[in-house]
Amino acid sequence: MRVLITALIAAIGIDAAYVGTAAQGSKTEAARPKSAQPPRTPDGHPDLQGLWDYRTVTPLERPRDFADKEFFTDAEALAFEKRNAERLDNVVAVHPPGWLDYGNKTLSDHRTSLIVDPPNGRVPPLTSAAKARTAANRPDEKAADDPEQRIPQERCLVFGAGPPMVPGPYNNNVQIVQTPNAVVIMNEMIHDARIVPMDGRPHLSPSIRLWLGDSRGRWENDTLVVETTNFTDHTSFRGSDQNLRVIERFTRPDADTLMYEFTIDDPTAFSAPWTVRFPMTRSSEQMYEYACHEGNFGLLDILKGARFDEQKNK
């Protein structure tokens, strides 16, 4: 991992002295008391660098049985965590113990969903056009004929690494390297790295479409704002399309916390914009490469299974 970060630093011309110990993990910072003010970089901006852990069992959307209740009580949070642990115990036949890493706690403020807007804590309804597109794109009986017909997640192309980033079953870690001219956001999931220019350059031409979109960053006071556009029509987040615009906000309120927020703006897919917010916790662990494609036997077995069924049914 250190070799990869070093290569990224060299690729974008980062001054190693500016980065300091960020590429080596956050063990040095771990000695600071939690109440300490977050450090700043030589140019005066908050130092967001380090490894951040964002696992949580708080769901993206508010559970139906909590209706319009924005926060769990202490007792409800404990009961929800217990039910979640029991649910995970029932899926070990599919995912052996140690594979899943949602964590075992809800958010510290006991919010019932990661979605903070709209107030009901749920993804707004899809537009009629998005519903029709989603129905037309459902896999058919020939979906196992060609690996390119499988969904991007099965092909290890995009899988929760962002943008936007959402807590998932495992690999809930992100490492940030920061300079005056660029920020590198390195996800453990699929080991994707985004190099976000901070020099005010415009977005790429709309004719250029990327799996992770085209990100541009800027500072708004002490908040790093990253705006991403130019997604492909194959990159769908909860039903989004190629008009997706993601606005991420990174704020470090104290030395041990990175508050992460993103807004989904896609008027051709959703009936309204929606916003998610949750804290990330500074970690002193090491991030490892996730060899998703290299170990992707699932996709191979899907195709082999389909060929087996074809021969059996002849």
Image (cartoon, rainbow, N blue to C red):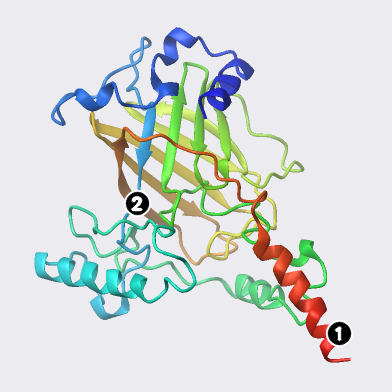
Secondary structure type for disc 2: loop
**Figure label count:** 2
Q: Where is residue 142? Give x, y as percent.
A: 80, 78
Residue 233, which numbered label?
A: none
- Determine the image quadrant of residue 242: bottom right
Badge 1 is on which residue? Answer: 311
Q: Where is residue 209? Give x, y as percent.
A: 72, 45
Q: Is residue 30 above or below residue 87?
A: above
Badge 2 is on which residue? Answer: 55
Mark 1 vs mark 2: in front: 1
Q: Earlier in the sequence, mark 1 or mark 2?
A: 2
Specify whether 166 is left or right of 196. left
Q: Where is residue 259? Give x, y as percent.
A: 30, 40
Q: Gap between marks 1 and 2, in whole Å? A: 44 Å
Give the residue drawn at x 20%, y 24%: 31
Looking at the rendered image, the quarter that the C terminus falls into is bottom right
Specify whether 4 is left or right of 132. left
Specify whether 294 is left or right of 119. right
Give the residue drawn at x 60%, y 46%: 291
How many residues crowd mark 2 within 10 Å: few (<14), some (14–19), many (20+)? many
Q: Is residue 182 above or below residue 279?
A: above
Residue 151 visible here: no
Q: Is residue 65 above or below residue 181?
A: below
Q: Amino acid at mark 2?
A: Arg
How many residues crowd mark 1 within 10 Å: few (<14), some (14–19), many (20+)? few
Specify whether 281 is left or right of 137. left
**In-front residue for pair 221/313:** 313
Secondary structure type for disc 1: helix
Q: Residue placed farthest to the right in the image? A: 314
Q: Amino acid at mark 1?
A: Gln
Give the residue drawn at x 41%, y 60%: 100
